[in-house]
Image: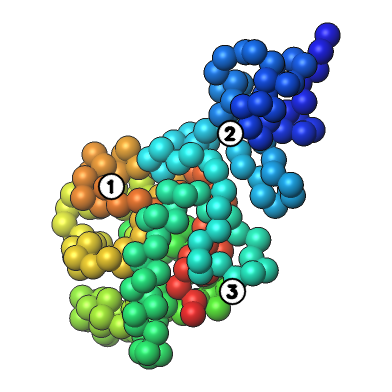
Amino acid sequence: MARCTAPSRGHRSASAAANCPACGGRSGYYGGSRGYSSYTSTPSSYISSRGNGGGQGGGRSGRSTKPRWSGPGSSVWYTPEEVRALTPVRDNVESLAKRPELRDVFLCHAWDDRQGAAKELYDLLEARGVSVWFSEKDVGLGVPLLRAIDKGLANSRVGIVLVTPALLRRLPSEGIADKELSSLLARERLIPIVHDTTYEALREVSPLLGSRSGLSTGEEPMAEVAAKLAELVVL
């Protein structure tokens, strides 16, 4: 039986697919409908044709690319959708480059996550040289919390919203997290990070926040999300 050449040589064009001894002449193959992956000349140029890995990010194509802010030695890859969503945020980061007193990131999270997912993300970002405003570290005893949050928002370049089941439960109550989101949504400096939930669930609770594209730990580990955020915000 003829064997498909895609795993070793790739179907880089329609003619290549047509010349494959196994797949030649089969309609609908090129573009990945059979679930193979195609490669360009080097492994680092991998382009997946297997779809979006679950679709939590709102129709991610799975293709890999590099944005203009990635360093030449970076091993981090992005989907085209991520690049489109993050580029306005990067533009704002660069516009604030002359204000070194600002923190790189304001981390908005549910109170329930302060010792769990929020702390994990904070540690990963700090380890990559990102300065993070984090309530567990930046709000001292006796300091009014709302006043501290206002100060943190005003003195950060980018806002990250860690969307978890706990945050989804608390948003309808219009608590402190809701106040943070209202301020962050008014600027082009907001990145939702969906963790242990989906964008579909987020849109049911907050259609406005759910309309923003971001990153998801359902598609890549938290460490990879932190790597992308670090590249985005560190100048």
How dense is the environment of label 2, judged by Cα within 10 Å: few (below 14), some, or many (20 and up)?
some
Q: Amino acid at mark 3?
A: Ala
Res. 158 image quadrant: bottom left
Separation of marks 2 and 1 at Cα, in angstroms: 26 Å
Which residue position is annotated with label 1? 210
- Which residue appears at 67% of the width and 20% of the height? 18
Q: Is residue 41 above or below residue 3?
A: below
Task: Give whichever of discs 2 and 1 has the lower sequence position.
Answer: 2
Local secondary structure at mark 3:
helix
Of all residues, the one furthest to the front in this rendering is 15
Measuring from the top left, give residue 28's x and y in whole percent: 55, 18
Of all residues, the one furthest to the top in this rendering is 1
Residue 132 versus residue 211: which sits nearer the camera? Answer: 211
- Which residue appears at 39% of the width and 78% of the height? 94
Which residue position is annotated with label 2? 49
Q: Is residue 198 above or below residue 22?
A: below
Residue 206 versus residue 57: which sits nearer the camera? Answer: 57
The answer to whether residue 93 of the structure is visible from this angle is: yes
Q: Amino acid at mark 2?
A: Ser
Separation of marks 1 and 3 at Cα, in angstroms: 29 Å
Q: Nearer the viewer, mark 2 or mark 1?
A: 2
Measuring from the top left, give residue 217's x and y in whole percent: 50, 49
- Which residue appears at 61% of the width and 42% of the height? 47
Res. 48 image quadrant: top right
Task: Give whichever of discs 3 and 2 has the lower sequence position.
Answer: 2
Q: Nearer the viewer, mark 3 or mark 2?
A: 2
- Which residue appears at 38% of the width and 40% of the height? 58
Q: Amino acid at mark 1?
A: Gly
Q: Which mark is residue 127?
A: 3
Q: Is residue 166 left or right of residue 67?
A: left
